[in-house]
Image (cartoon, grey):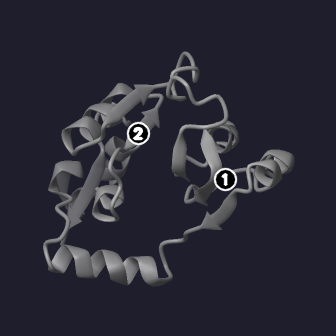
Amino acid sequence: MVARLGGANTVTITDIKKEPLRVAENIGATRALDISQSVDKIALKGDPRGSFDVAFEASGNADAVIQAIKNLKSGGTFVQVGTFQNTNVSIPSDVVMTKELTLKSSFRFDKEFSWAAEYLAAKRIDVAPLLSHVFPMDEANKAFQIAQDRTKAMKIHLAF
């Protein structure tokens, strides 16, 4: 949604679970790819050095970082959003250098949180399609249990 709001003509989403991919298609992803078996279909045909101008890595998976960087076009931008369990993640620095990539990061507590609140208040973006469940605060434990299962939940809201 935000990529489209930012001017992206096409948006490719990858995941290893079918449920988030269905949601991504419903909210406007151009391509929603299940890469649980193979990452070969990420690259667009005819682009051996990369298919994408910008890649956001939100899973916190080191292999996803490698794939994102591999699939960027020369001069592309990689944005790290996901948090890693193991903080010693290696990146292919020679690929970053030879493709002249830009590396960025985003952590939700700088300007991004206020931007998100402004976009929601101004109705520039509608996140309702991402919301799979609403629980009252007294069912918070149940909400957290369901939130752990990506086959049952996308985003959970606690109402209080």
Q: Is residue 88 left or right of residue 35?
A: right
Residue closer to the observer: 157 or 19: 19
Tell me if residue 89 comes above or below residue 121 in the rendering.
above
Quarter location, residue 92 = top right
Residue at the right extreme, as displayed: 94
Give the residue at x 51% y 23%: 45
The label nearer to you, 1 versus 2, is: 2
Tally of marks: 2
Q: Where does the image place residue 115, in percent across and percent down from the top left? A: 34, 80
N-terminal-most mark, 1 or 2: 2
Quarter location, residue 113 = bottom left
The quadrant of the image that shows the C terminus is bottom left
Q: Where does the image place residue 152, in percent across and percent down from the top left? A: 28, 34
* Residue at the spot of label 2: 12
Circle number at residue 108: none
Crowd band around label 2 with a 10 angstrom C-alpha radius: few (<14), some (14–19), many (20+)? some
Q: Can see residue 132? A: no
Disc 2 is placed on an element classified as strand
* Residue at the spot of label 1: 84
Disc 1 is placed on an element classified as loop
Give the residue at x 24% y 75%: 119
Q: Alpha-carbon distance for marks 1 and 2?
A: 22 Å
Amino acid identity at mark 1: Phe
Q: Where does the image place residue 59, in percent across and percent down from the top left? A: 54, 46
Give the residue at x 54% y 16%: 37
Tell me if residue 110 comes above or below residue 146 in the rendering.
below
Residues at badges 1 and 2 in contact (C-beta under 8 Å)? no
